[in-house]
Image: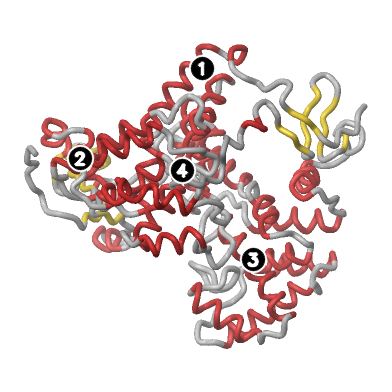
Amino acid sequence: MNMKNSSSPLHGYEDSWRTDLGGSISGERVVVRGRNLFTDIKDYPWFKLLLFMITGREFNDDELQMLDSLWALTISYPDPRVWNNRVSALAGTARTTASLGVGAACAVSEAKIYGGQANLAAIDFILDCKSQVNEGVALEEIIKKELKVNRAIYGFGRPVVKGDERIPPIENLMKQLGFDNGEHVKLAYQVEDILKNGRLRMQMNITGLAAAIGADMGFSPYDYYLVSANGFNAGTTACYLDARSKMAGALFPLKCERVKYEGAVKRTWKEI
Amino acid sequence: MSEDKANLEKEFIHSKIWNEEPEEDNPFVAAQCFCAGYDVYNEILTRASWAEYLYLLFKLDQPEKWQATLLEKIAIAVANPGIRSHTVRAAMCAGVGGSSNASALMAALSVGAGKLEGAHDVFLMMSWWNECGEDIDKWKSHITSPPQPHRTEVWGEIEHTPGFDPNGVSCATPVKQTLKEFVKHSEGSKLKWLLKHRDELESITQIPLAMSGVIATALIDLEINPDQGEMLFLLLRLPGAAAHALEQKKHGWRKYPFFGTALKIENDPGE
């Protein structure tokens, strides 16, 4: 049979991991993307280092402030009702460890209706939308097709409430820092105008605006997704702490009667 | 506010799986638990096997004998993917570093969730089964032009035919043994079809069938859906990860590979 591999392609990797991302030379130095961490980039704040590790780019102070504020103001609230926060709060009330609770909540934050999957899809849409517009496709057509294929447009429409209270403070900051005129941001507002006046009456939510800002900063969808993966940890940690400091088991306890059973009636187990 | 009105405004968890009747002295504690109508601690605990109960949880009906047997065989086949597998190695990293036992299983789940012989590989192959059935032409079309998602997804693009090993040279012996054994127990048709068409499929993929492919097919014979299959694969692979993490925890990091000389930094600026 004609197989692709005549021998294992793993042979060349045995005890050999070649990388230009970095590593530590024990007792001497740490290398990050070709820079010495302790000398070349020792003044980087943590967030700048995270961005440099992911993208290899050195973000300027305005970009850092914009991104930092998107994290601080829009995605990390100490509210245990939110799904990812609920996980760390449950961890606290069930008296597991902080890292287990926050780690699980971080994984759960990669959700479809918010968080990681939504962020990725939102930036993917706005970048794709821009390149289609550049090719001469009418925006109305792009939106119509997206709704037909996807039944929704990530970054537009928001579950639970209609308006998005997170947008005004971010818009103020965008004006202040000069991110209000980017090509993708302008396009996002045009998409919102069409959707607002359409049958679905959808508005842009903060995921859509943040994705447009990210697109204007030159993020690829995957890099943007990687950066946002840690963004929820402030809120999830706070929710863990809150529940951990109260009576064990006290977070949203449920009586047996709170289960609405909709399944088979009582029956007898038969030996098979 | 009257008690009735307060009750009306309460939110509920809706379920076809689970029901409970409370203890008389404590509404927060169940006196009786029912799974799909069966009394868990009175009947299932005393009469059912683990595989039967597991089947019930996902399918909401008692299995037939062959279904319980096949599910148990699946559980054995994947219980320990082996000490060198990515998922078990992730658990052992937790063990040697003295991390919590739960973190070892979280590590095993996260790594074992992947598209390379992991749970998402099983999910994808089960989805392909649902799309291609026993039609070799449809399989050929999927293999040569894999369906890709409309938008970029966190799982990334399909890099190889799900259920097959992109780094393999020929079909591994345990994979062939497992397929042969499963076929003996299944009353479904997909495992038999896979056994008959393995060579043909491998000649199209040019990579060998993997264990994940056999498991995905067995789960399809059990009429499990891809989401359920992904979950079952994740949880049934945990025993090996747990046992190996504990073993290495006892041995400690000094007896576990650190790959001290393996890292080659290609752009080291030097001192």
* Marks 4 and 1, how far apart at CA: 31 Å
Question: Label 4: which residue?
Answer: B208
> Which residue in the structure is indicated by mark 2?
B185
Disc 3 residue type (three-letter): Asp
Q: Residue furthest front?
A: A1
Inspect the image, locate mark 4, and give the three-letter code of the amino acid beneath it.
Pro
Which of marks 2 and 1 precedes in the sequence? 2
The residue pinned by badge 3 equals A124
Circle 4 or circle 3, nearest the eye: 4
**Kind of residue at badge 1:** Gln
Q: Residue at x 11, y 34 (%)?
A: B42
In terms of secondary structure, where does tag 3 sit?
helix
- Residue on which disc 1 sits: B248
Q: Are marks 3 and 2 in contact (CB under 8 Å)?
A: no
On whether disc 3 and disc 2 are found on a single subunit, the reply is no
Query: Which of the two marks, 2 or 4, is nearer to us in this view?
Result: 4
- Nearer to me, A108 or A168: A108
Q: Same subunit under labels 1 and 2?
A: yes
Q: Residue at x 32, y 60 (%)?
A: B133
- Residue occupying the point 52% across, 78% down: A147
